[in-house]
Amino acid sequence: MSTKQPMERRKFLSKIWKWAFGLVAVAGAWTSWDVLQPANPGGFGGKIKDGDPADIPSKGIETVSAAQAYLTKEGDEVVALWWRCPHLGCRVPWCETAGEFECPCHGSRFNRLGEYRAGPSPRGMDRFAVEVVDGTVVIDTGSITEGPPPGPESIDEPPGPMCIEGGE
């Protein structure tokens, strides 16, 4: 006959602590797995496909939410502007009546190509690299170029009535 000896308290506590530490280590590895995976190349920070360049307006803008960008044209070239204001990072909406971008936070204004017009912004709106691949616009949100410094505008499109309250 075999009789089981009761486990000593120290051995029991030692085993419990080892199991608890092992479970914490497994839980930490399990939850860290997603963080260690490479970022999704199709989302912001990667390349985003939009559509046919012929559909992009030459006197207006097209919003691409997945890229956090606005698309417009300068001649035949497609321009992708980051919708973030260079001043403090607010989203800069397009004002259809004024034909320009107007920052609701501090009043910076930019023309259709994102060039600085007025306000506290230190420069024009930042741009993303754009290429046309097999008839599709591809916006590379991982490649950002700082907007142009204040200076003469390259397009002659005078603003209309402003959208921002208190505007001229």
Image: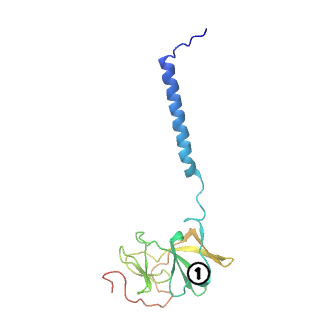
- Count all numbered tags in the image, as a single digit: 1
On the image, the x and y values in percent for residue 95 come to 42, 82
The residue lying at 37 percent from left, 85 percent from top is 162
Near-viewer residue (76 or 137) = 137
Q: Residue furthest right?
A: 134
Q: Residue furthest top?
A: 1
* Local secondary structure at mark 1: strand
Quarter placement of the C terminus: bottom left
Q: Residue furthest front?
A: 1
Is 164 located above or below residue 2 in the figure? below
The scheme the figure's colours follow is rainbow
The quadrant holding residue 129 is bottom right
The residue lying at 64 percent from left, 77 percent from top is 136
On the image, the x and y values in percent for residue 145 come to 54, 72
The residue lying at 53 percent from left, 36 percent from top is 23
Quarter placement of the N terminus: top right
The quadrant holding residue 160 is bottom left
Residue named by callout 1: 78
Q: Residues within 10 Å of mark 1 (few under 14, many from 20)?
A: many
Tell me the amino acid under the disc marked 1: Val
Is 111 located above or below residue 11 in the figure? below
Q: Is residue 97 left or right of residue 17?
A: left
Near-viewer residue (30 or 167) = 30
On the image, the x and y values in percent for residue 82 come to 50, 73
The quadrant holding residue 90 is bottom left
